[in-house]
Amino acid sequence: MTAARFSNSARYWRSPLVPGADMVTAEYYDHAFTPHWHDAYTIPVIEAGAEHYDYRGSNYVAEAGSVPVINPGEVHTGARAVDLGWRYRVFYLPVDFVQSIADEVADAVQPMPWFSTDVIRDADLARRVKLAHQVLETGADPLAAEHALFDAVSTLLVRHAGQRLPVARMRMDTARVDVMKARLVEDLTAPLSLTELAQTVGLSTFHAARLFTREIGLAPHAWRNQMRLNRALEALRAGESVTDVAAASGFTDQSHFTRHFKQTFGVPPGRWR
């Protein structure tokens, strides 16, 4: 059976967590991009199909699961490489944003990051970029979204930037971790960004997330969700409705609560109760 071809549709959107950035969720069949360039880093992840593009005097094909990064100011094109077209998610990240993450990772000012022309074929990186794009698009959990974005961009920089990026060493700091834990549970229903959490302990966003994850074994948003679930158990035992418990625990909706509950306890909250 022949796969259905993609349509020509694109949705451009923005997130308050990444000022100045543009994101696009799109699929194309017979659209062809003329030679053009962006002021930002173009960081796509191909979800299905394949894209053909010209870049710096050569031709490239980026298939599903690849991350074909384009440097700022570099002229490139884009068109389908297979009959059905291609579907992808793209970050257009400002230079100063990517530079700031590079500086945070190294804990020192770094040269402007630059990437080779080769298509990046790194399945783990592709998964991280896709996850960051998805959670930013839903906008449901700013803590999870910002963590996923920093994780994706720092992974890209450490593994694939042209100039090897040194990762600063970090000492154990139980006191700071305890302060972050207290901030995370202060109000489980209040939105909290990773930047706000890092400011609580006077660290950069990257280093706060790295410190917490290394010492606790969970990222800040995952630990916070676990605390929400643990506190939800008492209310469920008392016979409160799943809908009420989800809202009181800080989850965006009942489906969000049910998904996390089942992943942790193996059954939906209604059956557990």
Image (cartoon, rainbow, N blue to C red):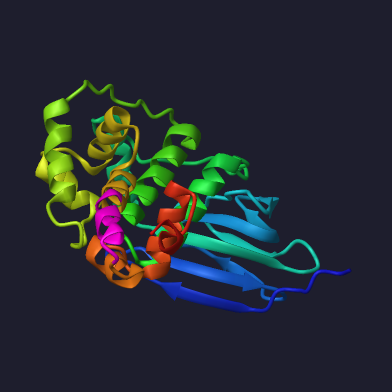
Residue 116 lies, in percent from the top left, at 55, 40
Identify the image quadrant of residue 143: bottom left
The boundaries of the magenta stretch are 230-239
Let me know if residue 29 is in the magenta part. Answer: no
Asked whether residue 18 appears in the rendered view, the answer is: no
Using the image, determine if residue 37 lies above or below residue 34: above
In front here: 35 or 106?
A: 106
Residue at 30% across, 54% down: 233
Judged from this view, the residue extending furthest toward the bottom is: 8
**Residue at 42% from the left image edge and 64% from the top image edge:** 270
Residue 54 image position (x, y, % from top left) = 66, 56
The residue at 30%/60% (across/down) is 236
Residue lying farthest to the front in this orientation: 238
Principal secondary structure, stretch drawn in magenta: helix
In this view, 143 is above or below 116: below
10 or 214, which lies in front?
214
Q: Position of residue 263 (x, y in %)?
A: 47, 50
Quadrant into which the N terminus falls: bottom right
Number of numbered tags placed on the structure image:
0
Image coordinates of residue 191 in percent, x first then y, are 21, 62
Quarter location, residue 84: bottom right
179 horizontally vs 239: left or right: left
6 to 162, vertically: above or below: below
Look at the image and tell me whether residue 234 can be seen: yes
